[in-house]
Image: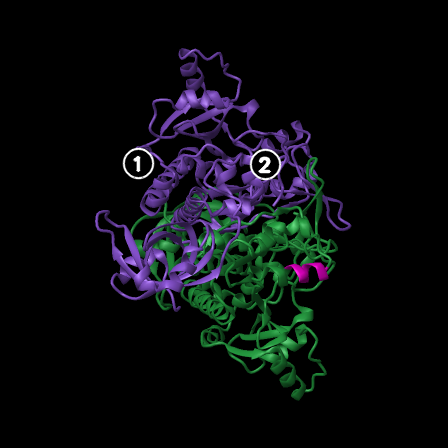
Chain colours: A green, B purple
Amino acid sequence: MSYIFVKDIKEHLGQEVTLKGWVRNIRHSGKLLFIIFRDGTGDIQSVAFKPELGEEAFEAAKKLTLESSVILHGIPKAHQKLENQFELAIQSLEVVQYAEDYPISKKEHGPDFLLSNRHLWLRSSKQWAVLRIRHTVYHAICEYLNNNAFIRFDSPILTPNACEGTTTLFELDYFDEGKAYLSQSGQLYLETGIMSFGRVYDFGPVFRAERSKTRKHLTEFWMMDAEAAYVEHAENMQIQEEMIRFVIRSVLAKCDQELDILERDKEALKRADAPFMRMTHYEVVEYLRTKGSDLDHESDLGAADEVMLTEGSDTPIFVEKWPKAIKAFYMKRDPENPDVVLGSDLIAPEGFGEIIGGSQREDDHDLLLSRMQAEKMPIEDYQWFLDLRKYGSVPHSGFGVGLERLVTWMSGIHHIRETIPFPRMIYRIYP
Amino acid sequence: MSYIFVKDIKEHLGQEVTLKGWVRNIRHSGKLLFIIFRDGTGDIQSVAFKPELGEEAFEAAKKLTLESSVILHGIPKAHQKLENQFELAIQSLEVVQYAEDYPISKKEHGPDFLLSNRHLWLRSSKQWAVLRIRHTVYHAICEYLNNNAFIRFDSPILTPNACEGTTTLFELDYFDEGKAYLSQSGQLYLETGIMSFGRVYDFGPVFRAERSKTRKHLTEFWMMDAEAAYVEHAENMQIQEEMIRFVIRSVLAKCDQELDILERDKEALKRADAPFMRMTHYEVVEYLRTKGSDLDHESDLGAADEVMLTEGSDTPIFVEKWPKAIKAFYMKRDPENPDVVLGSDLIAPEGFGEIIGGSQREDDHDLLLSRMQAEKMPIEDYQWFLDLRKYGSVPHSGFGVGLERLVTWMSGIHHIRETIPFPRMIYRIYP
């Protein structure tokens, strides 16, 4: 490589270097020209001095506009006052392309304009920071799992069955085989994987054809499902807690600059890296009632309930042992109370809501079959799932993490649509 | 954790341990019972001695069948003769579930039977080995890219455009927005990402509704697309070569046992980790003609041509500078010969065929526009793609790796359908 990255600048102080990138900002004052230069790995203030550059080159440089592409040759040095800040003294530059009338300016743009120009909006500092945090969160999850004996096991996207009804499924024609549906979760397939690999996970896109238009909904988003043989309910929560705390530490260690750009409260993130509280659904309802809620013991928590629950808590809270009627058929019943399931939702602090759902799974063939019959599921289509309870069934548990919701929390941003490169929503599939 | 994994057994020699898993095989001889025990992280021969276990427990253990789930308590020791092999002396055991009539036996089964029982077939040693190699290849690719300044940038699956015609696209209804299509490649979207992050990649499922029924085709498979700003054709090939060689070394270092199970020729893999040859398409055609081929200079290489080309080569071979007529509109023309493009295919040795396609991209707005018009593409739908050439265009290149084809080569297996947990093919979407 005949050039260096901005991220590596401090290893080259005082040396002649070449940087290749774009103009984030530019201003001039007499014989000085200041370029905020970016190359994707970071930004650096670069200064051109007319007598150094020469008349002609200086005039060409003055014509640079926002988002013009440019190659800089110069000498990096430490900032005189700010620690860990560097400047480039430009010796010469090559204009690659002058950008004309870049559509996104410093002024406020509406969300619809920005979403329609998502391909350009991505370049703004804030979007750059959020998506780099996404990169870090993604790999922190994989690193934790890989270090804890989980094997990547990609579940299929095209599936023949409509597990929980077709109303929120995207449907398509699959050659001569009839209808296929886009996966909403790889969980059932993952359960086949643990019987071979012990512990498995997938991490890919899932799809919900929901007509929801909230700041927390996407129709296409990324989900990590993990599943582990011989892991029961309590250990399942322990794994989730360790994983989330590992993610927090990774983001704090690797994304300091990104968190600054987003003005994220880093202290709040640090405080979340502490043991997570566990409350049963019953206890949660009782607690919320003392705070004025009229929630009953048979109901799911709404977004407002989740906010109220975590108010005053630094860490996420596990809500466990849910009423069986409002949870999925495959969750194992609590042997101490058959009206509740050994499932848990993990609720993030600071109002960011649910980030994980998990449970121990029913491992008894006949119990599972009777529940599937009660839900009028097409048994023949799920014979493979029932087979897992016939040939060496074991206690097992798993959980699913919504990547974008976790990134929303880590980034401290308001709207989930900024946590994925090209958000798909009910009224948005372009670009 | 109250138990250990087989993979960690050598750290516990001589200690009392608990293992949780399944019976891969069992036989008894007088007072001895031999169980090939597996827990997903590895296999271990375990021996029960009747006087040690007691009459009743020994009789219960003798009833264990293939794929029964079982918990063993015992003491691991080194194998008397074989290095790095261990045995467990069973002290006691708990039967979790007796498996009855496990459908997959030692006898040969046809592919249709095995594919219909994919959820069980996954447990066989060979499938276990192939999918663990897949895990290793996936993470080796990510590790190489992460260490070389690439940022993960997930491209969308649901796309509004049918870039190369609709004949091989899966189509679905997207709310009130009309038709949507499942992505065949994230490349065009990745080009937006480099303008923000410098270097990006995606790694997710892609879809081809092709009516092809060969051992190399899947309708749903995983693809890694990488794209880098300011990288030109030669450096693009250099990155690909470094990445593939890193993958080879990772598989050799981490999957020794898996390669043994598959009887993979490890020496052939080691020899592939050497500088890759580069030949132009013109040179390749000339060379193949000396070997009796009647290929002409305007044609793509067929599978047989690829095999003939790499015969006698230890390493993959780059075929570069293809005739423009048979390559995509976005590839940059060679300034030294405008009839060819600055693209390359990487052909694996040992007859495994193409594993990467890549090119430098056209970065000139007007040239790109005229080519899109010539191909009668709907310009308005691709305005965002053209915008990238208006606002700070830079030379850039990228490439796409088919994960399953790469895993097929690493594993040395014949059919691509074994390299993904649940293969989707023209006549196969279950389970």
Q: Position of residue B253 (x, y in %)?
A: 31, 46
Image quarter (top left, top right, bottom left or bottom right) of the N terminus of chain A: top left
The one of B325 and B8 positioned closer to us in this rendering: B8
Q: Is A69 within the magenta?
A: no
Disc on res. B365: 2
Instruction: Examine the rendered structure and indicate whether residue B97 appears above or below residue B85.
Output: below
Q: Which structural element holds mark 2?
A: helix
* Badge 1 element: helix
Q: Amino acid at mark 2?
A: His
Residue of label 1: B270
Pinpoint residue B333: horizontal percent, then vertical percent.
51, 27
Q: Magenta residues, as a range?
A: A369-375
User: Label 2: how many residues lie within 10 Å, few (<14), some (14-19) or many (20+)?
Assistant: some
Q: Is residue A374 magenta?
A: yes
Pair 2/1: label in front: 1
- Residue at 58% across / 81% down in the picture? A311
